[in-house]
Each structure stands twice: as structure tokens, then as C-alpha cells.
Image (tube, coloured by chain):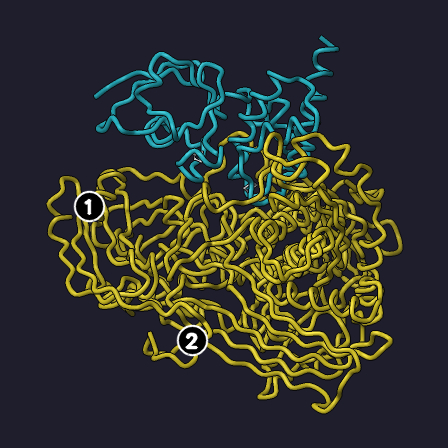
Chain colours: A yellow, B cyan
């Protein structure tokens, strides 16, 4: 494992591996997660969910639930006082189903009781008479099938037409690829506490990625003005996109308002699988055409995503899957059609990588196919077509920022291979682990390569601004900076970074973060799209600079000089020439300084009817080389090593960057060989950690970071790019390429299942 | 009904309406010890790991009433009294960057206690195997492995200086 830690003179500020401020309470078990909340006299909530993927509700009788001792509220759709539906982009999802249910797990009744077990029993006692309907489960059918929702079955169709439609290449490869439904599987289950307030409003303590957008949706459904619905961030046990949508928020508030008592809800793992969106399953057809030298001439693509029953962020996910369908390559001519449709499968929305993951699995398989058709080395083919600064994307956008694609490819490809082969590994390190493996002689090693990219921040004209306030004051033991920002800490380390930025900009040693809350400050936007370092980091930095400017003004007045002749350094304001200096503490004796700023990224524009437009703020790239061992008879795969290089702009905290890379790769490896929500006619067959498998410490390969490429991004605070998503994008296709290399099988679907290898049909080439 | 549990060396009275409550629920909701976590409540994730008479168990799978008479150690019982008073495993987790969201962390800290007591100098594969019952979704385990190795070294150094 390579940790890139350069010698830095500083031990604080930007660029050092500062430890997490919440690390100590977390290792002691004292950090309060959303499931740890407690209020005197609180009740427990529970939600009854539909067992059917599609059904009409003929009759609903809550009487038997009320008959149970200790039950305090039993609410149905008729008890929702405001808007009956909510949604991130389109409010098409019922808070509680009224007359139809459109997916297995859809909420129907919300219950509050004295004990969580009582609440569960009461929900189970509700009589719901369903008339099951034939579920619409194939996204191909959805486009022409009768609508299963008043809004219709097509969430969005997008077409990109770029370059010359007549352009042709001599070498042509095509293929169809599939991606299964992945779950974010964060560890901290959906949970929260709603407390009714004296003003008739409600305070909700909740684990989420975006307090303000939750607040807006909850208030609409409650029929309350925004200021009466206050959301406060409770400790978040991971997110990865699954907390971007409202899940239990409205239910909790309804129950608290109905009972006049605090209500807590903690979902079981099974209910957690049902209550958040998943990664969109995809079917992607691609045809690549290149000249004999391996230069891409044209790419045609059709992308179909299954959005499930409700819209969530589907319209943005398809935008990414379509715009990035051809990969981080110069593609002069392209036609791409993208559809995302409604079915009776579970709703899909945001997950780390957001549309770019599905696209990358397909286009990287194609690049390998093309390399084989050309008789070219796959890495060389990628290098020959790699995007650079100044190139034009298929959406017509010119890359104005950094795009070190060739650098990440070369670094990842050049990383040292594992020292030992499968013959020398301990049993436990072989596919299937100790005791389950066939003979060692049937284990084959394979190496595969992939590169991918993604946009940072929201796109298509969306202004996802972030607000931050910095207050600098003299506390008992010196200057103290307090940062107020609604950015949700979900584990990624914004709390660390906000402190580092204050240290860097103000030279203070003591920084505290106020608890994020809609009652304290405006929106910070979502903790997603790899955007908080840039957006909320930028807001904190600007607020610090505004405070520093006022410090300089103060000092200038005292010293009888101009603020332009002064600098803030080492905890003091000093004259550029001469020996005049005033300590920050002295200056703060006059009183605290406080500044609030709103940080915006560069304005983008929507895509036009030909899918052209300057739609994205910036891009980040990463490359992965995977080494796998495959048991040919059992079809088991052990991922041995992932070498990676990533375009990071600038490293602000090396340890946190490494944590994002390793954690993101784990989810990419999971999608490659383990993770899928298995559906049978719309029914989820594996909503538990027994059957939905995520990588354990035994499954996880060694990660070798060959390079963190630092080409500062213009316009980005400190030049830093977000680092959370790229590790998840190309790690999956790299692993599958390695399995193809080991087995000779085409493997066009992820996750690769043992049967795909062990039971490959006779027509498939066998090793 | 009432019963007594000995948690982190202290006898604690439990007043519960339902005998079906798991040890995890009683620790978290009745005894004010929410350090043990509840990622699955089905014995699949290890986030609820505690020591029961020194044995590593999933508290979600143990009926609280069946733990009467046993010595229960939770994550809250591992560090010292002071707010920054960490044991070597907890310290290693903080310093190595093994904590992101931290939901898996208390269970891992307890599991690593169990490992290092049994195997003071584990190999990488012994560590991977020992913590393979503890799911972490954030870190990819790399920094956790580093933390365990750091903690093993710290214990060894302590033993030498003693
Ligand atoms: S909560 Fe006990 S093993 Fe998951
Ligand atoms: S740190 Fe989040 S689950 Fe391990």
C-alpha cells in the first residue's frame, strides 16, 4: 500500500492528514448517531409496507391495530394534511399509498406505539385487502406499456447528436451490457426523532445528505410553512446516495404531530432495503468504430435505465449515463439515446457514481473488445484516445479544466504487480476462502484495466450553492473560529476539512463546527456529486477570507495604515514592510467578527434538443488495474489487487483521500462480483446482509495507489477536485476485464455470478 | 419484570416489559449505552459486538435476560475515564484513519480486542479473518488493517517497557 505523504512544513491547515474531530467519540461509542437519539416520553414509529410490487388497495381497516394496547397513532394517506406526494425532482411518490401500490415496500400505514415491538405488531394487525396486479417489470416494455402512474412511464428521454452522422470507421465492435441493481448498504439504518414544537411545527433530527431539500419536501406534505419545520442533522452512518431522497422523514413528523409526543423510528435492515432508492439497473448497447490506427471515429449508444416506481433523481442519472456513455475519450462523432423509465421495481436514484458507473462498465468492455479487434494493447488504445484539456466532449462542451487522463492511465498501468501468484498464497486468500476451493491448479490469474470519469457538482444549469458562516471571537484560551454550515457529514470528512480550511485561512488553532440545521443557516446543497469539498469547502474558505478582511481593516485603523499593506499570518496581522504587528487575539478584544457567504460554482447550461451544451462544471478521472484469481470450476473470484491512479486536483488531506479511494473501490469490487438486489417479478428476494453480500475484509483486495495526480483545477477552492466518486466508477470494469482475461468468457453483465463462469454455455469460448 | 446485568463491571437493574428484548436493545434503550450499534439486528454485521464473559458475541442475538450473571463488556467499558483517554486500539483507529462514518467502529474495536487478546501479533490474513464478521461500508478496510497492526505494535511496546 502506497500512501503519498509529502513532507510539509505545516502540521495543520490544508494538505496535512489531520485526524477527524469526531474520531475520538466514534471509537469510544459516544458519537450520537440518528438511531441513538432519545427523548423523554418518546414513542416508537413503524411503517407498514406493501408486500406486492403492484396492487390495488380495495380496503384498509386500521381498527385491529388500534385495538392493541400501547398504540398511539395509526395513520393512512387520508391523514396527510398537505401534499400527498413528494419527490426530489418530481413530486410523484405518495407519502402513504392511497389506492394503489407500485412497488414492493411502498409505505401504506404509519404507526406509533409505546414500544417498538408493539408498533411492529400493530402494523402487522392492519387489514389491507390488496388486489394484486400484473407488475410491469421489464424496462423495455415500459416505454409502450399502459402507464402505471398518472405521470406516465418515461421519466426522461435524452438524445445526443454530435459531429458528422455519416462518419464511419474501418474497425467496428458492438455489444450489449447489463448492470444489476446495487444497494448503497450504508451501515447506519434509516432513523430519526421527530419532536412536536410549541409553535405547531416540528423539529426533526435525521440522518440525511441534504437537510434543506428534505425540509422543503416535508413541509409541503405537512402543509406547514418552511420555518415551522426545522431539520437538524443527526449522526449519519454512511449515505452513498441512499439518503438523498426522503424516506421516513414525513412519517416521523406526521406521527409526532398526531400524538403530540416525540417519536423515534429505527428501520430494520430489511425495511432499510425497502425504504431507500438503489442504483439504476442498466441495459446499454454500444457500437464503436475506429480507424486502423485505433483512433475512435464514431460511437453509437442506447442506454436504458430502470427507474423503478418513482422518479427520485432519475432524470439527472440518465443525463450522466447518456453524456458519459462514450468514456473519457476523444469521440468526434456520436449518437446516444438515453431513456429512464418507470416500472414496478423498487425506485432507483442516487448512488455513488450516479449514472457514470453503468456507462463505464459498458464503454470499457467495448474498449477492450476494440483493442482485441485491432490487435492493440488495451492500455495503448486508451492512451491513444484519452481526453485532454481543451478537448471537446460529445455534448459539445470544451474541457476548460484539468484532464490528466493519460497520466492516470500510465500510472495505474505501471504499478507493480502482486509479488506472489495463487500457487503461493495461503488457502484463505484463494477464491472461496479456506476449505471451499477446488484444486489450486484450476485457479487462473487475470489482469484487467479500466479508466472512467464523472462530473463534479450538479449539472445542466442547476445552481447548487452553499452557504457558510464563520465567526471569529476571543475565547478564554485564545481566538476561536466557529463554522456554521448545513453540509451533511456522512463519514466523508467535511468536518475535518472545514477545520483545516479555517486553520489555513485564519491561522487559528481552535475551530468548532456548529451542528448543521435548517434553523441556523441556508442550504449547503447535497453531500453528493463529489461536491462538498468544492462547494461548502469553498463557502467556508470565502467566509474565512471575509473575516480576515475585516481583521485587516481593524488592524489598519489601529495602525493608521491601509489594509492592503497588511497580511494575516501566524496568528497576527503584520505590516508588509516595517515591524508593526497586532495579534489576532488583541484585535478580537474589540469584539467578535462574523461573515456569512454563499458560494456558487460556475454557471452551467441545460442541454439543447441535440444534447449539446456547456452542462457540467468540471470533471474528475481515475484509472484502475485489477488482478484477480478465478476458480474455473466453481466460478469463484478473488480480487487480489487493485492499482489505481486518480485525478484529484490537489490533495487537501492525504489520509482522507486514501479513505475515499479504498472505500470507493470496495463498492466497485462489490458491484463487479457480489452485490445485486435480486428481483423476481418485482419482488426483492434478498433484503438482508445474509443474502445481499457486500465485501468483507476477506473479500477486499490490496489497494495500491500508484499516483494522486495533482493538476490544480481552475475555479476550485485550493485547486481540489472531489474524490469520492471516481474510485467507484472504473474499478468495476477493471475487475470484470481481469475475469475475462482469466476465463476467456465475454461476461457482459455485472455482478459476475459464479454460474456465469462455472456454467458458461457451450457456445462460449472456454479456457 | 426486573433483572440485573453486570455491564462494564457495574451491576445495572433492568426494568423491562418484555422478555423478548435482545441484549442490544436493553443496552441501547434501557441502560443508556448506545455505543453498541444496530446495523442489522440479525447477526450479520458485527456492529453490535460485545464481550460476554470474555467471549465475542453479537448482542443482537443474545436475549438480555439470558445474560444475567455474565460479565458484559461494551465499547464504553474499554477506554479510560478521561474524555481523551483511549486504549491503544481506539487510539490506533483514530490515528490510522480507520474511522469514516464510524457506525462499524465500536463493533470493530471490540472485535479487535478479542483478536489481540488471543493473538497478540496477528498476520494480515489472521486480521482479515478475525474482522470478516464486521462489515464496514465506508473504508474498504485498508486503514482498519493498518489500525490493527498499529495497535498490535503498541501493545508489544507496552509489554517491553513494562
Ligand atoms: S446488529 Fe448484531 S450483528 Fe448486526
Ligand atoms: S466507517 Fe462507516 S461503516 Fe465503517
Residue shown at the point (38%, 61%) measured from the top left: A682
Q: Residues within 10 Å of mark 2 (few under 14, many from 20)?
A: some
Determine which residue is flagged by label 2. A141
**Ligand 1 within 8 Å, label 1 CB:** no
Check whether the beta carbons of the residues at disc 1 and disc 2 lie within 8 A of each other: no
Residue shown at the point (41%, 18%) measured from the top left: B7
Q: Are marks 1 and 2 on the same chain?
A: yes
Label 1 residue SS: helix
Determine which residue is flagged by label 1. A122
Instruction: Give the image location of residue A670, x and y in percent.
Output: 59, 49
Label 2 residue SS: helix
Camera-near label (1 vs 2) is 2
Residue shown at the point (74%, 10%) measured from the top left: B161
The subunit letter for the residue under badge 2 reads A
Residue shown at the point (30%, 18%) measured from the top left: B13
Instruction: Give the image location of residue A392, x and y in percent.
Output: 75, 79
Instruction: Give the image location of residue B107, x and y in percent.
Output: 51, 31
B59 relative to A508 in the view: left or right: left
Q: Quadrant of residue B152?
A: top right
A243 relative to A433 in the view: left or right: left
Q: Quadrant of residue A570?
A: top right
* Residue in front for this viewpoint, A38 or A344: A344
Q: Relative to B46, is A410 above or below?
A: below
The subunit letter for the residue under badge 1 reads A
Q: Quadrant of ligand 1?
A: top left
* Residue in front for this viewpoint, A612 or B43: B43
Q: Relative to A667, is A345 above or below?
A: below
A215 relative to A30 in the view: left or right: left
Amino acid at each position: 500500500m502506497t500512501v503519498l505523504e509529502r513532507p510539509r512544513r505545516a502540521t495543520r491547515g490544508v494538505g496535512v492528514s489531520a485526524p477527524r474531530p469526531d474520531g475520538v467519540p466514534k471509537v469510544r461509542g459516544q458519537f450520537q448517531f440518528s438511531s441513538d437519539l432519545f427523548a423523554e416520553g418518546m414513542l416508537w414509529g413503524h411503517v407498514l409496507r406493501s408486500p406486492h410490487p403492484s396492487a390495488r388497495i380495495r380496503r384498509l381497516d386500521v381498527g385491529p391495530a388500534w385495538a392493541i394496547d400501547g398504540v398511539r397513532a395509526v395513520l393512512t394517506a387520508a391523514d396527510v394534511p398537505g401534499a400527498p406526494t413528494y419527490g426530489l425532482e418530481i413530486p410523484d411518490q405518495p407519502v402513504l399509498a392511497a389506492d394503489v401500490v407500485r412497488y414492493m415496500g411502498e409505505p401504506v400505514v404509519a404507526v406509533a406505539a409505546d414500544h417498538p415491538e408493539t408498533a411492529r405488531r400493530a402494523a402487522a394487525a392492519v387489514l389491507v385487502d390488496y388486489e394484486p396486479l400484473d407488475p410491469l417489470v421489464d424496462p423495455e416494455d415500459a416505454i409502450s406499456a399502459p402507464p402505471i402512474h398518472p405521470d406516465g412511464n418515461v421519466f426522461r428521454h435524452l438524445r445526443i447528436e454530435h459531429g458528422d452522422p455519416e462518419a464511419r470507421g474501418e474497425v467496428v465492435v458492438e455489444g450489449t451490457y447489463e448492470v444489476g441493481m446495487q444497494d448503497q448498504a450504508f451501515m447506519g439504518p434509516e432513523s430519526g426523532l421527530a419532536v412536536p414544537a410549541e409553535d405547531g411545527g416540528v423539529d426533526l433530527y435525521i440522518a440525511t445528505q441534504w437537510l434543506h431539500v428534505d425540509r422543503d419536501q416535508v413541509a409541503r406534505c405537512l402543509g406547514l410553512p418552511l420555518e415551522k419545520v426545522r431539520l437538524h442533522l443527526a449522526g449519519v452512518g454512511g449515505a452513498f446516495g441512499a439518503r438523498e431522497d426522503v424516506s421516513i422523514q414525513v412519517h416521523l413528523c406526521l406521527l409526532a404531530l398526531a400524538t403530540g409526543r416525540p417519536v423515534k423510528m429505527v428501520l430494520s435492515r430489511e425495511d432499510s432495503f425497502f425504504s431507500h432508492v438503489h442504483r439504476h439497473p442498466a441495459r446499454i448497447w454500444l457500437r464503436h468504430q475506429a480507424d486502423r490506427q485505433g483512433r475512435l471515429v464514431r460511437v453509437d449508444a442506447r442506454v436504458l435505465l430502470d427507474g423503478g416506481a418513482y422518479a427520485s433523481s432519475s432524470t439527472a442519472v440518465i443525463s450522466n449515463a447518456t453524456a458519459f456513455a462514450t468514456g473519457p475519450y476523444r469521440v468526434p462523432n456520436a449518437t446516444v439515446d438515453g431513456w429512464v423509465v418507470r416500472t414496478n421495481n423498487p425506485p432507483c436514484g442516487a448512488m455513488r457514481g450516479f449514472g457514470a458507473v453503468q456507462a463505464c462498465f459498458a464503454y470499457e468492455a467495448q474498449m477492450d473488445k476494440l483493442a482485441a479487434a485491432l490487435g492493440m494493447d488495451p492500455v495503448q488504445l486508451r492512451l491513444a484516445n484519452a481526453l485532454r484539456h481543451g478537448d471537446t466532449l460529445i455534448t459539445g462542451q470544451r474541457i476548460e479544466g484539468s484532464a490528466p487522463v493519460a497520466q492516470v492511465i500510465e500510472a495505474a498501468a505501471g504499478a507493480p504487480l502482486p509479488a506472489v501468484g495463487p500457487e503461493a498464497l495461503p488457502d484463505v486468500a484463494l477464491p472461496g476462502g479456506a476449505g471451499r476451493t477446488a484444486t489450486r491448479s484450476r485457479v487462473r490469474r487475470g489482469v484487467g484495466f479500466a479508466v472512467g470519469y464523472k462530473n463534479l457538482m450538479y449539472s445542466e444549469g442547476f445552481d447548487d450553492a452553499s452557504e457558510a458562516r464563520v465567526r471569529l471571537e476571543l475565547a478564554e484560551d485564545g481566538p476561536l473560529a466557529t463554522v456554521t454550515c448545513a453540509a451533511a457529514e456522512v463519514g466523508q470528512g467535511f468536518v475535518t476539512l472545514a477545520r483545516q480550511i479555517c486553520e489555513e485561512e485564519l491561522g487559528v488553532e481552535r475551530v468548532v463546527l456548529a451542528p448543521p440545521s435548517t434553523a441556523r443557516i441556508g442550504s449547503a446543497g447535497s453531500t453528493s456529486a463529489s461536491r462538498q469539498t468544492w462547494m461548502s469547502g469553498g463557502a467556508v474558505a470565502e467566509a474565512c477570507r471575509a473575516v480576515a478582511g475585516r481583521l485587516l481593516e481593524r488592524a489598519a485603523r489601529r495602525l493608521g495604515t491601509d489594509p492592503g499593506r497588511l497580511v494575516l499570518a501566524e496568528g497576527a496581522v503584520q505590516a508588509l514592510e516595517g515591524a508593526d504587528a497586532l495579534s489576532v487575539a488583541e484585535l478580537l478584544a474589540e469584539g467578535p467578527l462574523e461573515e456569512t457567504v454563499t458560494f456558487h460554482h460556475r454557471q452551467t447550461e441545460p442541454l439543447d434538443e441535440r444534447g449539446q451544451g456547456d452542462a457540467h462544471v468540471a470533471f474528475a478521472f481515475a484509472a484502475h488495474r485489477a488482478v484477480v484469481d478465478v476458480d474455473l470450476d466453481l466460478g469463484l473470484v478473488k480480487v487480489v489487487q487493485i492499482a489505481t491512479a486518480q485525478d484529484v486536483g490537489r490533495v487537501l488531506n492525504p489520509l482522507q483521500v486514501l479513505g475515499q479511494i479504498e472505500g470507493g473501490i470496495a463498492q466497485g469490487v462489490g458491484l463487479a462480483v457480489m452485490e445485486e438486489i435480486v428481483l423476481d417479478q418485482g419482488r426483492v428476494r434478498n433484503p438482508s446482509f445474509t443474502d445481499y453480500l457486500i465485501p468483507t475484509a476477506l473479500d477486499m483486495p490490496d489497494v495500491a495507489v500508484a499516483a494522486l495526480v495533482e493538476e490544480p483545477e481552475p475555479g476550485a477552492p485550493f485547486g481540489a477536485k472531489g474524490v469520492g466518486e471516481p474510485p467507484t466508477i472504473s474499478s468495476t470494469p477493471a475487475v470484470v476485464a481481469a475475469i475475462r482475461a482469466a476465463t476467456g468468457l465475454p461476461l457482459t453483465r455485472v455482478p459476475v455470478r459464479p454460474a456465469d463462469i462455472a456454467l458458461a454455455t457451450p457456445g462460449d469460448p472456454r479456457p | 419484570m426486573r433483572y440485573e446485568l453486570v455491564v462494564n463491571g457495574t451491576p445495572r437493574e433492568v426494568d423491562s416489559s418484555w422478555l423478548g428484548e435482545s441484549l442490544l436493545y436493553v443496552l441501547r434503550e434501557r441502560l443508556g449505552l448506545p455505543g453498541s450499534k444496530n446495523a442489522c439486528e440479525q447477526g450479520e454485521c458485527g456492529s453490535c459486538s460485545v464481550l460476554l464473559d470474555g467471549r465475542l458475541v453479537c448482542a443482537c442475538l443474545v436475549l438480555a435476560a439470558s445474560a444475567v450473571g455474565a460479565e458484559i463488556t461494551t465499547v464504553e467499558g474499554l477506554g479510560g475515564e478521561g474524555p481523551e483517554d483511549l486504549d491503544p486500539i481506539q487510539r490506533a483507529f483514530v490515528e490510522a484513519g480507520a474511522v469514516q462514518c464510524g457506525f462499524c467502529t465500536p463493533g470493530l474495536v471490540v472485535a479487535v480486542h478479542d483478536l489481540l487478546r488471543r493473538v497478540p501479533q496477528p498476520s494480515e490474513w489472521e486480521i482479515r479473518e478475525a474482522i470478516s464478521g464486521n462489515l464496514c461500508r465506508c473504508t474498504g478496510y485498508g486503514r482498519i488493517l493498518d489500525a490493527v497492526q498499529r495497535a498490535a505494535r503498541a501493545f508489544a511496546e507496552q509489554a517491553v517497557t513494562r
